[in-house]
Amino acid sequence: MNRKQVAKYKKLLEAKRAELLTRVQAARASEQERGAEDAPDLGDRALSTQTRDLRYNLSTGEREVLRRIDEALDRIEALSYGECLHCGKKVQQARLDAVPWALHCIDCQELQDLGQI
Ligand SMILES: [Zn+2]
């Protein structure tokens, strides 16, 4: 993948990340208005207080996406973006267009969905 393509995906990832973080911040603001007492316990006690607060009102799926976006951005820095984490082959560009934070190629993703890797 050339630098121009990587830059495109980086932009997509950062836009999605900003969108998710904006939602966290909006959720936090309304949480503070309501007071913290009636906040739900997500049972995420292993996380630091700060991290837990920041990610408080994201659904599990959204938190997972945020984590994967951070990983994908790390992989861009490490110049390994676009390689399947499992088999090391290039992840199909159509797949990255749909899911820029994808860590696996389509074949390996299917295996993972089946719990085989
Ligand atoms: Zn693969």
Image (spheres, rainbow, N blue to C red):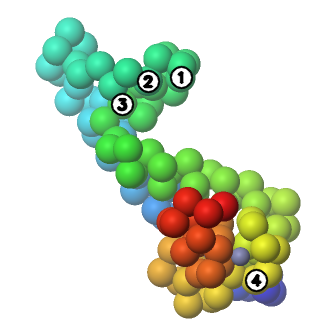
Q: Residues within 10 Å of mark 2 (few under 14, many from 20)?
A: few
Q: Amino acid at mark 1?
A: Leu
Marks 4 and 3, how far apart at CA: 34 Å
Left-right relation of 85 to 50? right
The residue singled out by tag 4 in the image is 90
* Relative height, residue 49 to residue 113 (above, below): above
Q: Mark 1 and mark 3: span between their CA atoms?
A: 11 Å
Residue 47 tag number: 1
Residue 93 visible in the current orientation: yes
Q: Residue, x 56% and y 90% (percent of image)?
A: 94
Q: Secondary structure at mark 3?
A: loop
Q: Using a 10 Å C-alpha cutoff, classify the residue at mark 4 as few (fewer than 14 neighbours), some (14 to 19) or many (20 or more).
A: some
State which tag comes first along the sequence, 2 or 4: 2
In the picture, measured across the screen, residue 102 lies left or right of residue 66, that is: right
- Amino acid at circle 2: Asp
Question: Disc 3 designates what residue?
Answer: 56
CB atoms at circles 1 and 3 under 8 Å apart?
no
Residue found at x 80% / y 86%: 2
Q: Residues within 10 Å of mark 1 (few under 14, many from 20)?
A: few
CA separation, marks 1 and 2? 6 Å
- Counting residues from the start of the chain, the first of labels 1 and 4 encountered is 1
Q: CA distance from mark 1 to mark 4?
A: 33 Å
Badge 1 vs badge 2, beta-carbon distance below 8 Å: yes
Name the residue: 44% across, 31% down. Answer: 54
Residue 67 location (% of width, % of height): 56, 48
User: Does 87 appear above or below 42?
Assistant: below
Per the rendering, the mark at residue 44 is 2
2 and 4 marks in contact (CB < 8 Å): no
What is the three-letter code of the residue carrying label 3?
A: Tyr
